Image (cartoon, rainbow, N blue to C red):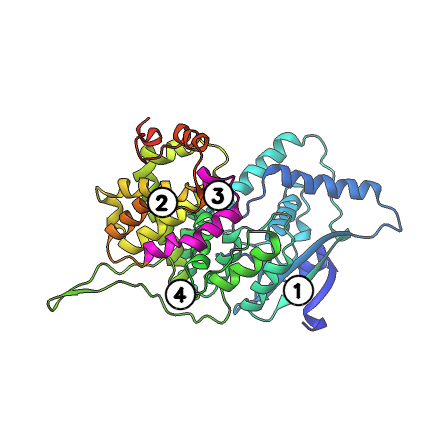
Amino acid sequence: MSNKNEDSVVLTDFLSKFQLKISDYQRPYIWNFTQFLKLYKDLIDYKTNQEDSTPLYYLGNIILVKNNNGEYDIIDGQQRITSLLMLANLLDQKEVFGCNKDLEITSTISKDNIKVNASYFRHYITGNLEKIKFENINITYIIAENQDQAFKFYTTLNTSGKRLNGLDIVKPFHLQAVDKEKQEEKARLFEEYQFSNSLLDNIIKISLRIRYWVGFPFRDFPRNHVDSWKEILPEEFANIEMQSGHDYKYATVVEEKGISITPDFTYQINQPLYKGENAIHYLIYWGQLWMKIEKKLKSEIFDKLDKLKGVEFHKEYYEMALLCYASKYGEKAIEDECFTEIAKVLFKVCFYTRLTKPCSKISIQKKEEENQLLKRILYAFDRNEIINYCSDFFDESTLKDSEKITTGRIQAFKDSFGYKNKNYKQPFFNQ
């Protein structure tokens, strides 16, 4: 990065120099009133305690990229910039806007959150509102040469004060690769699921683990610590070298006596992904399919599972198995009468390690590497293979000595989950 593309300036000069745009592919404005008010109070406290030798109030990095209209898309910093422009408006300091008097906010979520914060501010901050010295706010702006470079800066230099989740990292990269006329449509698809229930973020985490564990070779999955999370997500879901313009689905063709049967083409959970619409449609498809799975299994499994404690790693493993099954047999398989019974069988295998010894995320990963349940599901020719494997899995004669199940552990599992083996019942599923 050359010096001409990076500089440190005061906010008023920055807003006068750059006409800013918040693109549709950016996450919406999501600061709550607590965050908004903290920024205001910090700036007032800074002004009150400022002395001649006090350095300027440093707001952090702002990452920009110039678009074809001569405007500058904000890649990182929109939460802070939007909040400051709101404060300037609420405090009647509109001269701060510079060339951004007409900054457009298109996201419905952003508009709603802006209205809420402005309303709370007017309600709780009464009397003579103290002005902010915007000319004493210092920022460092970085102008990326293109969207891919901006995305790289975004994932490594994020300074918004809120940890990036998986969707925050993946979403902007793929939306900016979509044709301009489609960006708003695709952004609204993401917006529908992004903040109401974290659905797509969970799909990213589950599918990413599957892609690590069913690949050749089996790969250890790095948990989502800040550094590793930012490295593996772009590599798997947003690789800069991946081509755009493709939107592939896959199906298995079965032929008998010259007659071919081709199931519906769908997005496969472990398929290669291409930049832009392919990755976007993949995530939306699996998000919608997961909602159908949850609805189908709600009363039989998930309502009961929600009451259990200390099983979060088993639950993740179970979710992976269900998605692999849906990937193998398609959306119609979820509506089959046998789906609930197969889901119960998979449940027992995924929660099996709870019987033999205390479990951790590492022990579950090692057990999958050894047993390869997910690969067995994805590469099974028919569902009976999966059922037979799961049934044989609990044959005591095949267990290692270290895996023998003590009477106490059997009773504990029976009381909590249910375990169909030998002469006792399945209280988890029959209670």
Q: Nearer the viewer, mark 2 or mark 1?
A: 2
Name the mark on residue 7. Answer: none
Q: Residues within 10 Å of mark 4 (few under 14, many from 20)?
A: some
The amino acid pointed to by label 3 is: Phe
Residue bearing the label numbered 1: 142
The answer to whether marks 4 and 1 mark residues whose Cβ atoms lie closer than 8 Å is no
The answer to whether marks 2 and 1 mark residues whose Cβ atoms lie closer than 8 Å is no
Across and down, in percent, residue 36 comes to 64, 41
Residue 243 as seen in the image, left or right of residue 86: left
Q: Residues within 10 Å of mark 1 (few under 14, many from 20)?
A: many
Residue bearing the label numbered 2: 397
Disc 4 is placed on an element classified as: loop
Q: Residues within 10 Å of mark 2 (few under 14, many from 20)?
A: few
Q: Nearer the viewer, residue 88 or 149?
A: 149
Residue found at the very far top of the displayed protein: 431
Q: Which residues are magenta?
A: 353-378
Name the mark on residue 313. Answer: 3
How far apart are labels 4 and 1 at the CA level?
33 Å
Q: Residue at x 45, y 30 (%)?
A: 408
Name the mark on residue 272. Answer: 4
The quarter of the picture where the N terminus appears is bottom right
Q: Nearer the viewer, mark 2 or mark 3?
A: 2
The first of marks 4 and 3 along the sequence is 4
